[in-house]
Image: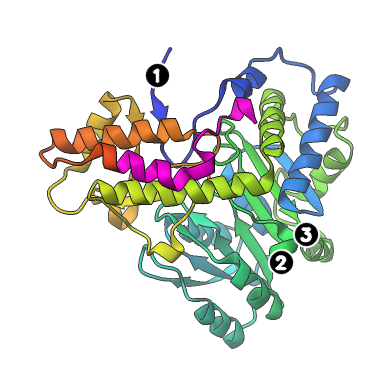
Amino acid sequence: MESHTLVLIPGPTPVVDEIREGLARPVLAHTDPRFVEVFRCVISRVRQLMGAREAYVVAGTGTLAMEMALVNTVAPGERVLVVSHGYFGDRFVPLAQAFGIEVDVLRTEWGRRVPVEEIGAQLGRRSYRAVTITHVDTSTGVVADIAALGPVIRGAGALFILDGVCATGGIDEDMEKFGVDVLLTGSQKALGVPPGLALVGFGPRALEARARMGRVPAYYCDIANWRPVMEEPSRYFATPAVNMVFAMDVALDIIFREGLDRRYERHLAYGRGMRAALRALGLEPLPVEQAAAPTTTTVLYGDGLDDVTFRRLMAARGITVAGALGPLAGRAFRVGHMGNVTVAELEGAVQAMADTLAEMGRPADGAAARRALQEAAGPYADFRADRC
Ligand SMILES: Cc1ncc(COP(=O)(O)O)c(C=O)c1O
């Protein structure tokens, strides 16, 4: 089915032709040396992107990556501190409980960060095997301050588990630099690949923890079963998602051609630009500005706008934005601005928002909003994956 819909939800993100062509390549046997070489190169570049000691690339989604991160570092009966900035932060609670892991949670009002001092104080009160943090909580668009958190978590002797599902490839989260022990992510967001791959990086402290654990209550998720494959991809444990690996290979080409620093700066500029454009339209981003994510924005409607109508009229203009989750459902929408999306595409979305607002009886200045976006995008205004 042909579709000209621009998917601007916070993942999956638009997939450029070059990456789609990776998916469309003839299937090879997972033992074929041509595939094995691509897989080897993907694993090595994921390790480089993450700053990991070991990287695991397996068929699955972000939730599987969360599970893999947790079960390989925290044993049943041990305790984790979950720091939650929304729906996906909260997901660590039932996940940990499913494996008999004890959980304490620190939460805050949606749109704000849990203060680092509060996390430090909790770590002083009790001993934890690990702390889980969602780098960008996709429900709220809040970005965690991982530079401040690393020393606090490490200082308390806990492992730092970072959920990068809505960040990896769009925000710097180099594990060595930030003191992250496990970084987990999925393929479908800032990496610009369709959903289907779970990626997990482990640092030395996390690997020591895994070695001390002996057996873990998992099979597919047990990194001990995958390690021989990640070290030598011609080996078999479970069939790799061959064409997803081809697509990831192209995505990594794009990412490294663009350059990590440039890519992270571009996302910061996109975030600033989208928030400026939304304000010019009379809409308010949910997060306080210093906690606003570069990759996605949750936008409050204010009074008098019906969520379902707004998103239906946006869809009629060829733009899919997402509804809000949990307590914000019906009161906000979410727009993604990550991966290989261009400023021209974001401008089209902003104009569609202006036209939709006008149609709903709330006139908005689309030209001013597009100008605000352009100005913030600055040197990144011409980004195109195929020109990197
Ligand atoms: C921050 C975050 N963590 C975890 C997940 C779960 O990933 P998946 O839906 O791929 O299982 C998501 C999904 O959107 C997410 O945004």
At 89% from the left and 37% from the top, the residue drawn is: 232
Write down the residue under mark 2: 179
Residue 114 visible: yes
Check disc 1 and report the residue beneath it. 4
Nearest the eye: 359 or 303: 359
- 372 in the magenta segment: yes
On-image quarter of the N terminus: top left
Residue 248 pos. (x, y %): 68, 31
Expressed as whole percent of the image width and height from the top left, the position of residue 118 reads 50, 81
Q: Of the residues under marks 1 and 2, which one precedes in the sequence?
A: 1
Is residue 291 shown above or below 233? Answer: below
Instruction: Find the magenta span and give its range.
Output: 369-388
Quarter of the image where one finds residue 15: top right
Q: Is residue 352 left or right of residue 359?
A: right
Alpha carbon separation for disc pair 2 and 3: 9 Å
Judged from the image, the secondary structure of the residue bearing numbered disc 2 is: loop
Q: Nearer the viewer, residue 182 or 366?
A: 366
In contact (CB < 8 Å): disc 1 and disc 2: no
| Res 20 quadrant in image | top right
Question: 75 above or below 197?
Answer: below
Asked whether mark 1 and ligand 1 are closer than 8 Å, the reply comes as: no
The amino acid type found where label 2 is placed reads Gly
* Disc on res. 203: 3
Give the residue type at disc 1.
His
Is residue 326 in the magenta section?
no
Residue 83 placement, left or right of 256: left
Do we see residue 320 in this rendering? no
State the scheme by which the image is colored.
rainbow
Residue at 13% in and 37% down: 360
Q: Where does the image place residue 304, in percent across and percent down from the top left?
A: 12, 48
Give the label, 3 or 1, closer to the camera: 1
Residue type (three-letter) at the residue carrying disc 3: Gly
